[in-house]
Image (cartoon, rainbow, N blue to C red):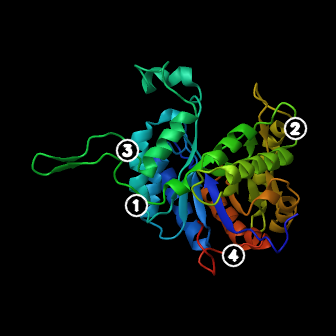
């Protein structure tokens, strides 16, 4: 169990950026205001989920650019961007551009695999190459190489009077490669991330190995350890291996009675899916953690996955209102974080490597 000798070092939050399709601008503005609030409260990071053809943020790159101009200190990341929807070369250009606009505060979280419901969208997404696209680790490896500044082509130099051409992705943002994260849900993907120099995002959804008992916390712990073992043995590491855990926590310290009832209904409705593996791959979901900050801290200290980390990005519930997020974030920053040994950003803290 963690104690005061290993306090929580970095505190972040994750949001889906929900919006009303009849008024999407208001939802996006709410998300930007939540990020601004997070900075004022001293959070170290804010993370955006990536959602396509849903009523959540479909373009977190654009949102990070906007947020970077309304904040000055908080780090901004994606958790996660599925590369099945992306062209790695174009994405590398966008990420580097936003990172420079943000002063080196961007943390791209990535994953690979076939896009969700691919059969329903492949003819629009890849009309000429749907059956040829490679959704393996090679796709994220290519993105990482491009962000690192490795050559794209042999051609470069001046052409004509004024046009200059580069053989690498431009602009180049030094340090961005070290801030690439991989969203892993299995021991295999966690070890791959460690071997290949990515930081690790471990969320509230995991995939157990065939021989593992369905104990979420213990499986998450084993995956984090597999990641660290692989990272420590990797000759190609890009800096200290960082791990962030992302559970759903809902502190109720300053919540109204109506909010507490609403939050409890949300947790109760989601609880049945956590009792057994789900779907053909046996997905395991972590139960949401609700209560006072002291009650949540006690549960986290007893959580085997939490015991492995000193960074978290607590996930905000999907379907709450703006004022609910204000209350939850305020309680996390003012009550839960300090109960876990955290100090707000800017108060005697050193930046991450």
Query: Closer to the N terminus: mark 4 or mark 1?
Result: 1
As displayed, is residue 346 above or below residue 95?
A: below
Residue designated by label 3: 151
CA gap between label 1 and label 3 equals 20 Å
As displayed, is residue 273 above or below residue 299?
A: above
* Residue under the image location 53 percent in, 51 percent down: 108
CA gap between label 4 and label 1 equals 27 Å
Q: Position of residue 291 (x, y in %)?
A: 83, 60
Q: Position of residue 159 (x, y in %)?
A: 15, 45
Q: Check disc 4 and report its element: helix, strand or loop.
A: loop
Residue designated by label 2: 214
Q: Viewed as shown, does residue 246 lie left or right of 219?
A: left
* Residue under the image location 83 percent in, 42 percent down: 271
Residue designated by label 1: 100
Number of numbered discs on residues: 4
Foreground: 153 or 117?
Answer: 153
Callout 1 touching callout 3 (CB < 8 Å): no
CA gap between label 4 and label 2 equals 34 Å
Callout 3 touching callout 2 (CB < 8 Å): no
CA gap between label 3 and label 2 equals 45 Å
Closer to the eye: label 1 or 3:
3
Is residue 29 visible in the rendered image? The answer is yes
CA gap between label 1 and label 2 equals 43 Å
Residue designated by label 4: 343
Q: Viewed as shown, does residue 212 lie left or right of 198?
A: right
Q: Position of residue 105 (x, y in %)?
A: 50, 63
Foreground: 35 or 165?
Answer: 165
Q: Check disc 1 and report its element: helix, strand or loop.
A: helix
Q: Residue furthest bottom?
A: 348
Closer to the eye: label 4 or 1:
1
Q: Residue furthest front?
A: 235
Within 10 Å of disc 3 (Cα), the crowding (few <14, some 14-19, many 20+) is: few
């Amino acid at each position: 169990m963690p104690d005061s000798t290993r306090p929580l070092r970095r505190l972040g939050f994750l949001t889906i950026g929900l919006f009303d399709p009849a008024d999407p601008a208001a939802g996006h503005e709410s998300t930007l205001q939540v990020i601004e609030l997070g900075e004022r409260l001293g959070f170290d990071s804010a993370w955006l989920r990536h959602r396509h053809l849903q009523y959540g943020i479909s373009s977190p790159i654009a949102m990070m650019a906007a947020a970077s101009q309304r904040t000055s200190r908080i780090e901004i990341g994606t958790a996660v961007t599925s590369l099945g929807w992306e062209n790695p070369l174009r994405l590398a250009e966008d990420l580097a551009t936003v990172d420079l606009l943000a002063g080196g505060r961007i943390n791209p979280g990535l994953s690979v695999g076939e896009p969700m419901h691919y059969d329903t969208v492949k003819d629009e997404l890849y009309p000429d190459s749907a059956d040829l696209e490679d959704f393996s680790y090679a796709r994220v490896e290519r993105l990482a190489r491009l962000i690192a500044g490795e050559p794209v082509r042999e051609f470069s130099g001046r052409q004509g009077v004024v046009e200059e051409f580069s053989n690498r992705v431009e602009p180049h943002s030094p340090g961005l490669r070290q801030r690439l994260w991989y969203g892993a849900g299995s021991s295999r993907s966690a070890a791959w991330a460690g071997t290949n120099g990515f930081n690790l995002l471990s969320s509230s959804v995991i995939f157990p190995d065939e021989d593992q008992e369905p104990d979420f916390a213990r499986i998450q712990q084993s995956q984090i350890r597999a990641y660290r073992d692989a990272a420590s043995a990797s000759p190609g590491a890009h800096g200290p291996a960082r791990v962030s855990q992302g559970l759903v926590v809902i502190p109720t310290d300053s919540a109204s009675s109506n909010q507490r009832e609403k939050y409890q209904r949300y947790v109760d409705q989601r609880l049945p899916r956590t009792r057994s593996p789900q779907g053909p791959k046996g997905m395991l979901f972590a139960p949401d953690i609700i209560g006072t900050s002291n009650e949540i801290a006690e549960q986290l200290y007893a959580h085997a996955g939490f015991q492995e980390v000193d960074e978290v990005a607590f996930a905000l519930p999907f379907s709450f209102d703006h004022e609910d997020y204000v209350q939850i974030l305020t309680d996390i920053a003012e009550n839960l974080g300090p109960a876990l040994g955290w100090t707000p950003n800017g108060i005697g803290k050193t930046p991450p490597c």
